[in-house]
Amino acid sequence: RKEVEQDPGPFNVPEGATVAFNCTYSNSASQSFFWYRQDCRKEPKLLMSVYSSGNEDGRFTAQLNRASQYISLLIRDSKLSDSATYLCVVNSNTGNQFYFGTGTSLTVIP
Amino acid sequence: NAGVMQNPRHLVRRRGQEARLRCSPMKGHSHVYWYRQLPEEGLKFMVYLQKENIIDESGMPKERFSAEFPKEGPSILRIQQVVRGDSAAYFCASSPSRVTLAKNIQYFGAGTRLSVL
């Protein structure tokens, strides 16, 4: 079983739509969770950390469900500039390794 | 404050040659991570280093690959006798201290794209 699993998509949504991505992880001892975005052939950039209580940053909301071992990302009022691949990232129980999902592709259509 | 610097950005090697990839972490960062991304795949952890120490190399292939982070200078990922399957994007990330409980995050360099002919 992979450490982190994501639906690869693609998700094609119109501008202004709300879209949600889920990610599941296998190691119940994981402590740190993140969402990164990666534009085509560029480096991953941190979008937001994910906290147990859930957290929001503008149009982006992240949730963590430890019991079910999944993480979600909600994007409201999608913009064209949100088009990217969204990577779910989970650390190992030792904290040394970070496991990346294969990413979910989002295209926001005018 | 310069970000994580990787060079070269693109590297072409013939089978059997050596590839050296360099990574200079952000100023003040002493932790370096190397990842490999194959086409259409996610990033795969390779190795985690601190100055002069390899902390975790469990993601590194046992043969031909090595990494170092000397007291002075950049971190180096070295691939000996490259094969076509080594063609990938290699990303380096740095953090200011051991990443725990989301207090510290990893900042990525732009990557080195290795092509093996």
Image (spheres, coloured by chain):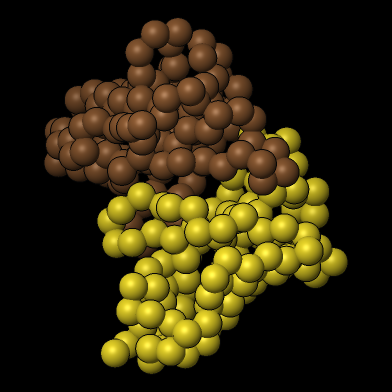
- The image quadrant of residue B103 is top right
Query: In the drawing, does residue A50 fall left or right of residue A35?
Result: right
The residue sitting at 25% across, 27% down in the picture is B19
* Colour seen for chain B: brown
The residue sitting at 58% across, 49% down in the picture is A99
Q: Say whether residue B111 is visible.
A: yes
Q: Residue B44, percent across and down? A: 48, 46
Q: Up-down: is B10 above or below B64?
A: below
Using the image as rendered, state which of residue B115 and residue A47 is in the foreground: A47
In the rendered image, the quadrant that contains the N terminus of chain A is: bottom right
- The image quadrant of residue B93 is top left
Q: Up-down: is A63 above or below B2?
A: below
Query: In the drawing, does residue A98 fall left or right of residue B75?
Result: right
Q: Say whether residue A11 is visible.
A: no
Q: Residue B27, percent across and down? A: 42, 25
Total marks in image: 0
Q: Looking at the image, which residue sits at the far right?
A: A67
* Colour seen for chain A: yellow
Q: Residue B31, percent across and down? A: 53, 26
Query: In the drawing, does residue B111 fall left or right of residue A106?
Result: left
Query: In the drawing, does residue B5 fall left or right of residue A47?
Result: left
Q: Residue B76, percent across and down? A: 36, 21
The residue sitting at 64% across, 36% down in the picture is B99
Using the image as rendered, state which of residue A108 and residue B16 is in the foreground: A108
The residue sitting at 20% across, 25% down in the picture is B17
In the rendered image, the quadrant that contains the C terminus of chain A is: bottom left
